[in-house]
Amino acid sequence: MFFESQETPYDLRWQMLGTHVRVSPWFWLATVLLGWPTTYMGFQYLLVWVVCWFVSILVHEFGHVLMGRVFGSQGHILLYSLGGLAIGSSNLSKHWQRIAVSLAGPGAGFVLGGLIFVIYLAASAEPDGFREEPTFVLITLKLLLWINIGWGLVNLLPVYPLDGGQVSRDGFDWMMPGGQGQRVAFGVSIAVAAIVVVVAMLYQQMFIALMFGILAFYSFQLLQQTRARPSSYSDDRAPWERDPDAWKQGGRKW
């Protein structure tokens, strides 16, 4: 579920900044479900949420892609049910390069969030400012801030395969090669994800609890794999992690 999803006749495809982009129909469904609470203000705000989420995830993934391109790794973007993937961008031999690519996604979101915050402050400083009741512009700015800053910080948690988990895995593997670092990283991922699950349940945030519960289980599976085959774990990665041109196989067309 964390790897590249199969293509469908309903995928959207285009090329942007020299990068192929594909959007699965499952992305739209998951985005609507995630943003459904906004409908209490009116269904027009659900549309606002979808646009904000789409733009923010796309900016995030372009952060990965452009940083990977700096190091000579070409990638393409897939938006799917769990968010987005910058496929092939981290297909690099050096740990520090992969860490830089992982951090570039949240970094791009923080830059966008910073620009939105400046706009928010500038609008608030106007004589009329924002009215006390929620306005269309105010809610849009708050959604963009929450997605790019709030989710950006969550994404930096050392929980695999979030970007923070990718950094943790590369960092520990860099310091402790031979499989030991990966086992430590997956152990940390399980522990942090479990803590988030408990906190989320205490605050009745069932979606977050479910998501991090799945991530904890996924990290547990990977930990078992590293224990069973510590020297060949990298060969168990998805095809696009081993070959950034794997998407070209099978007659796929952009």
Image (cartoon, rainbow, N blue to C red):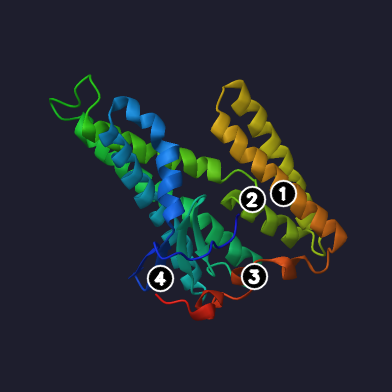
> Looking at the image, is 128 positioned above or below residue 119?
above
| Left or right: where 16 falls relative to 94 | left
- What is the distance, in whole Å, between disc 2 and disc 3 at their CAs? 17 Å
How far is disc 2 from disc 1 in space, using C-alphas? 10 Å
User: Which amino acid lies under the numbered mark 1 shown in the image of this protein?
Assistant: Ser
Identify the secondary structure beneath mark 1. helix
Left or right of 10? Residue 239 is: right
Give the number of callouts. Answer: 4
- Residue on which disc 1 sits: 219
Quarter of the image for residue 239 reads bottom right
- The amino acid type, in three-letter code, at marker 4 is His
Query: Are dots 2 and 1 in contact, CB under 8 Å?
Result: yes
- At a point 38% along the width and 46% down the height, the residue shown is 53
Q: CA distance from mark 3 to mark 1?
A: 23 Å
Instruction: Calculate the distance from the C-alpha at mark 2 to the C-alpha at mark 4.
Output: 25 Å
Please name whichever residue, 119 or 76, is drawn nearer the observer in this view of the structure: 76
Within-10-Å neighbours for mark 4: few <14, some 14–19, many 20+:
some
Q: Position of residue 7 (x, y in %)?
A: 48, 66
The answer for how far apart the CA atoms under marks 3 and 4 are is 25 Å
**Residue plotted at (40% across, 41% down):** 32
Say the numbered circle drawn on residue 94: 3
Please say if 23 is above or below 109.
below
Residue linked to disc 4: 20
Of pointers 2 and 3, the one earlier in the residue sequence:
3
Front one among 173 and 86: 86
Residue type highlighted by circle 2: Gly
